[in-house]
Image (tube, coloured by chain):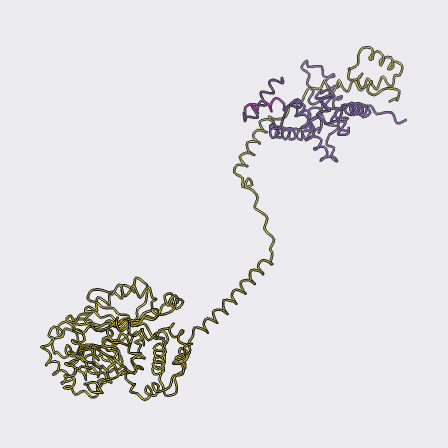
Chain colours: A yellow, B purple
Amino acid sequence: MDDRYDPNLILAYVEDELLAADRARVEAMLAEDPAFAALVADMQRNRETLRGATPIEPPADLAEGAMAAIERQMLLEDTSPGVSPPPPPPKPFRIAPYLTYGGIAAVLAITATVVFQSLQSDQQPASTIAMSETPLPGQSLAEATLEAQRKAMREFDAETPAAEPEVLAADTAVPAEEALAMAELAERTSLRSKERDDPASGFGGDPFGGDPYGGRGFGGAGDVADAFGGASATARDEPKRLDAKTAAASTPEPITQPPALLSTAPLPVMPATAGENELSDASPLAESVTAERGGEAATASLVLTLSEPETPLARAAAQETDPVYGEKEHLTSLQAQTFAQVARNPIMLNVATRSPERSLQQVNDWAFSNRIQVASLPADFSDVPLAVPAEVVSVEDTSPRPALPMDQDMAWKLGVDEKREAAQHLDEQPAVQYEVPAQLGRQRLQLKANAQQLGELVAALSEPDVRVEPASEPWSFSPAWMEWQSILQPAEVEIIIEPVRASERSDDRPRLQLP
Amino acid sequence: MHDVDESALIQRVQHGDRAALGELLRGHQRRLYNVCYRMVSHPDDAAELTQDVLLKVVEKIDEFRWDAKLTTWMTRIAMNASISHLRKRKHRQTLSLNQPAGGDDDGRLTLAGGLTDEREPGPEVCVQQHEMLDDLQRAIAGLEDDQRAVLVLRDVEELDYLQIAQTLDLPVGTVKSRLFRARLALREKLNPAPTS
């Protein structure tokens, strides 16, 4: 197109937007230039052709399709999981925090181990170490254990304040009436013992209470001995001599010391009226036996002392100077442990009941409820007869108890003399003959329980006609941490259910309170 | 459609009236389809583009603030979609130059195919018109995108310069210059100068 023409003017002419004057001027120009006129004519024709074209109808209802697409999209958005926010990108793995935490955990573990080992080394006393030592050649483990217990008792005695025995004596003093009654009983028993020719008896021969294990397992000095020395089998294996000494009738003298303390206390020991053999065979745990044996008629109080051990080994051990004894630095640790724990003996729980079946059932129920396994131990030990009163067994054809196998000791005890002796005293206690045999004999159970469980067991067994006396309470005089440990850690418990006669009251004997 | 009616219709659509939405879309679908068809010169592509334009209208209807006419706003959406489509198929020239009137084998429609004459002209006139429209459509398809957009808006949509400027977001002067160049190019394509 020629540059002489203004494009805007030409466009306006093509678009038919010019006024009449401008339009005339442009038409004059077009008349002068036919080529330019043809160009403008073609542009006008093309414009008119395009504007004259009829609009094309869409092939389908695009609006409906668009709305359907919108609704479909909305439905997909409602149910699509893509509506939920995308999951956060995974965090890159960083090993530094794990190394830090691992290092901290390792340091803590090492520290805890060191502290624990230091505590373990501190809490183990010298006596414990001595007790855990291997027995000397020719010394049995039982003897070694007993020796260790004696050492521990001496140390405990040394640590006990001087005023404490007096307080203990005041608490455990036997009333004068009871002491007199016990003295009378002891006199009768000693008379019977004199009549009985029983030199070979290793048990003291008390048909009623003669139990080398501790006098029917409960009561009196036997309990004290259990409490301080632990009535373990090893302790029982070592026979101790218990001399029952009588004092003046006018001045009843209470039991002032636990037997463990009396073993070293320089108390005056009065000769017993009974034979030495008989007394030596008596168990120090059998308070009733000693009371009956020591029998002076005018006995007003009971003083129990442990005599020197009879076996050479025990005598030598008693005469040996204990280097630990008197060393105050060990007393605290010794105090922290009971003898039962020191010697690793079980906690003894003596149950005197007129219905051993019921007590046994109660123990079983308690064990079942606490999911504790109870093991039944043989009631008759190798060298100890059953605690069946001789009179009862000696009564022929009156016992409804089925025939039980008797060992030689029992058979020996049921000799002619015994029968005769029992027959002579048959009129004294006739009720016993028909009552005890119908009951279950001594039951010896073993289980593991902590302090709380043991308390529950004692509560379960405690009934009006049942007397339950823990032979030892390891945690009773332990420091706080030891008590905590004892409560949490179950200890081995041995329960002896001892049948008693109906005529015998469970609380007719003096009780010694544990410190 | 009057502005007052459009205003009420849009308010109804903005409040979730489905019927109003259908009415609005149906009222503009043919015009939008023709814009798309003149731009892309393919009926299927034009239909697909038109549907996409309608969807965008629905999606953006809440953003419409009456700063322009609704027609201009919709045409702008259609023109942008068409130009984007043309850029995608930049190297594809699908317009058949030898197709019969009313469509070819692959469904393409020519400009003459959509030409209808209610007065039923004679067969010779119809043939001439169809041939002219075919030539014109081919020439339009050969224009540059910006010149084609201005030409389509001006001759097909019959918008004024201001509306074209609003639609293409161009100054009015630019629109005029592009339109003049588009007409010159179209004429050159239809009546090529002798090579002498």
Which of A170/A494 is in front?
A170
Q: How far across and down, in percent of the image, does residue B170 sit?
A: 74, 26
Q: In front here: A202 or B74?
A: A202
Which of the pair A165/A500 is nearer the observer? A165
Magenta segment boundaries in residue numbering: B19-27
Please indicate whether residue B110 sits to the left or right of residue A373 in the image.
right
In percent of width and height, residue A284 lies at 26, 80
Relative placement, left or right, of A299 versus A9 is: left
Q: Quadrant of the C terminus of chain A?
A: bottom left
A482 lies above or below A131: above
Residue A500 on image: x %, y %: 19, 72
Image quadrant in which you'd find residue A406: bottom left
Which quadrant of the figure contains the N terminus of chain A? top right
Name the residue at the left extreme: A427
Q: Is residue A200 magenta?
A: no
- B20 in magenta: yes
Q: Nearer the viewer, residue A96 or A321?
A: A321
The dominant secondary structure in magenta is helix
In the rendered structure, the answer to whether residue B123 lies left or right of residue A175 reads right
- Residue shown at the point (56%, 30%) measured from the top left: A68
Image quadrant of residue A270? bottom left
Q: How many marks?
A: 0
Q: Quadrant of residue A463?
A: bottom left
Query: Residue placed farthest to the right in the image?
Result: B196
Instruction: Point out residue B153 in the picture as x, y percentages from the top left corner.
Output: 72, 23
